[in-house]
Image: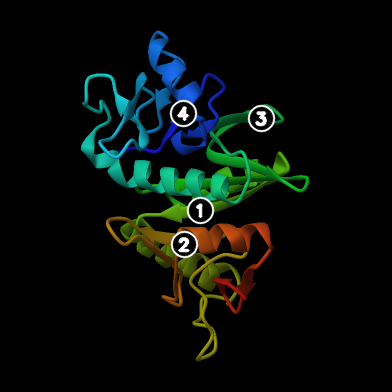
Amino acid sequence: MPAYALDRFDTPIDASSIPPADWDMFKQRPTGDFRMLCCRAPAVLKNSQLNTQFFSHLNDECATAPETAWHIQGKTMVLEGLSQLGLTPRSEEPGRSGTQKWCADTWVQFEGRNIAIELQRSYQSLTEFRRRQARYLAGGVECYWLTRPEVFATLAKSCAQYRIRTEFGGKFPPAGYLWPLLAELPVWALESGDEPRIYGAKKTTASVPELLKAVLARRCRWEDGVWLITS
């Protein structure tokens, strides 16, 4: 039972936040005021047997391909997590850095900061990660990345090779020094499923809400070659 949908302004709306009287009123209006977060198809408002308010696809089917389930779940968790922190996140937020356009998977403003959290499901070269990150930076946007575990492993290998070549003169760094990531690219792996978790190069796990709180509190730190969530 999806608890969130997008309104006409692409703002995530929590079904439980709508007063029952307004919910009943919206149910009588033509479909189109709300769209499903997963595929942007028209959403209908329903009540469960326990009278829980939730959104549903118009035809009880999602038009989104199954292989995008990781992306959908990840984006939903980020939007819900930010909303539960009292913020107003947006999905697929467009922007521009000079002549370059971008569209953030999730975006939020907090205490004067513009923050994007991108979810990368498919393979993307290190060059493309760095290009997109630089574009956000040029537009005054902090960008943090969540990737599938397989993508994270490939990216970490590419980062390590890049650093060996550019920072360590083609030689391995000193023993005990962790070095698989880049300082300009905050990134973690996201394992989806029934018990989603994120982890970084040190394999320390955290939940998506814990990461979001750390981002807002500036507790995501680059230390000794890896990105950490500090207390």
User: How far apart are the alpha carbons under marks 3 and 2?
Assistant: 25 Å
Amino acid identity at mark 2: Trp
- Residue 149 lies left or right of residue 181; in this view the side is left
Q: Residue placed at 34% from the left, 21% from the top?
A: 44
Quadrant hosting residue 35:
top left
Secondary structure at numbered mark 1: strand
Kindly give the residue lying farthest to the right in the view shown. Answer: 112
> What is the x, y in percent for residue 88?
61, 38
Q: Which residue is mark 2?
A: 188
Looking at marks 1 and 2 on the same chain, the residue that comes earlier in the sequence is marked by 1
Quadrant hosting residue 157:
bottom left
Q: Residue placed at 58% from the left, 68% from the top?
A: 166
Q: Which mark is residue 145?
A: 1
Looking at marks 4 and 1 on the same chain, the residue that comes earlier in the sequence is marked by 4
> What is the x, y in percent for residue 53?
38, 34
Mark 3 neighbour class, 10 Å CA radius: few under 14, some 14 to 19, many 20 or more: some
Quadrant location, the C terminus: bottom right
Question: Disc 1 vs disc 2: Cβ atoms closer than 8 Å?
Answer: yes
User: How far apart are the alpha carbons under marks 4 and 1?
Assistant: 37 Å
Q: Residue placed at 56% from the left, 43% from the top?
A: 132
Asked if 117 appears above or below 26 in the picture, the reply is below
Q: Which residue is mark 3?
A: 96
User: How far apart are the alpha carbons under marks 4 and 3?
Assistant: 39 Å
Amino acid identity at mark 4: Pro
Amino acid identity at mark 1: Trp
